[in-house]
Image (cartoon, rainbow, N blue to C red):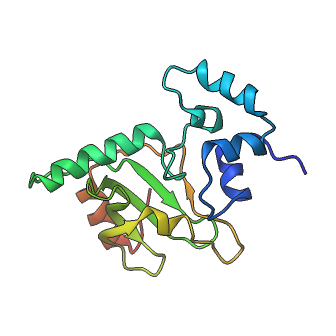
Amino acid sequence: MWIPLKAENHNRAFHGLRINGITIARFYGFEKNRFRDFVRTRKDKSAALRFGRTHVNHPLITDEEHAQLLAHGQARAAGQHIDPLPVVRIFTPDAHATWLLVSLDPQDGDTAYGLIDLGIGMPELGTVQLSALTSIVGPRKQPVMRDRYFQAVRPLSEYTRLAQENGSITD
């Protein structure tokens, strides 16, 4: 079976498994020496660049999103009252659940804070572990996905207000 070389296909094929860069490279046909040469040509030595630039520990967010989420998390941990734009939108394509995430806990790097809408008409602010999100599968066996085209247009407080008025996240 041929699987196109895209990060979302990798997540679909290996849903819920923790796989390092070497295992991914072997799956996609790199041999040991070819992989080593490929990594040497990259400035940051990251093989993840070849596979859609998703963050190594969390396939749902990119490296840039991870950095933004951590920066917001450090500001929140320092006691600053910030109202940032959501960084990433994660959703289930077949279960109507949506997460608008704004920060990551800097201590564990896995607990995200944001607006959570589980599709039952009661969206609210809360925390969720990214590792737990990767294990969620909808009724049609579709995994949780990152909205690659999401661009926040308002701060989190405004998304929260609108979601509570409408019973769901509208954007």
Nearer-the-camera pick, 17 or 31: 31
Check the picture and name the quadrant holding the C terminus: bottom left
Q: Is residue 113 above or below residue 4?
A: below
Q: Is residue 40 above or below residue 10?
A: above
Nearer-the-camera pick, 14 or 18: 18
Measuring 48% from the left and 25% from the top, which residue is drawn there? 44
Q: 96 left or right of 138?
A: left
- Give percent across and percent down for residue 78: 11, 52
- Give percent across and percent down for residue 53: 55, 37
- Give percent across and percent down for residue 23: 69, 47
- Give percent across and percent down for residue 163: 35, 67
Which of the 4 image quadrants contains residue 40?
top right
Measuring 52% from the left and 53% from the top, which residue is drawn there? 60
Nearer-the-camera pick, 126 or 66: 66
Which of the 4 image quadrants contains residue 159?
bottom left
Measuring 42% from the left and 50% from the top, which residue is drawn there? 88
Q: Is residue 42 above or below residue 2?
A: above
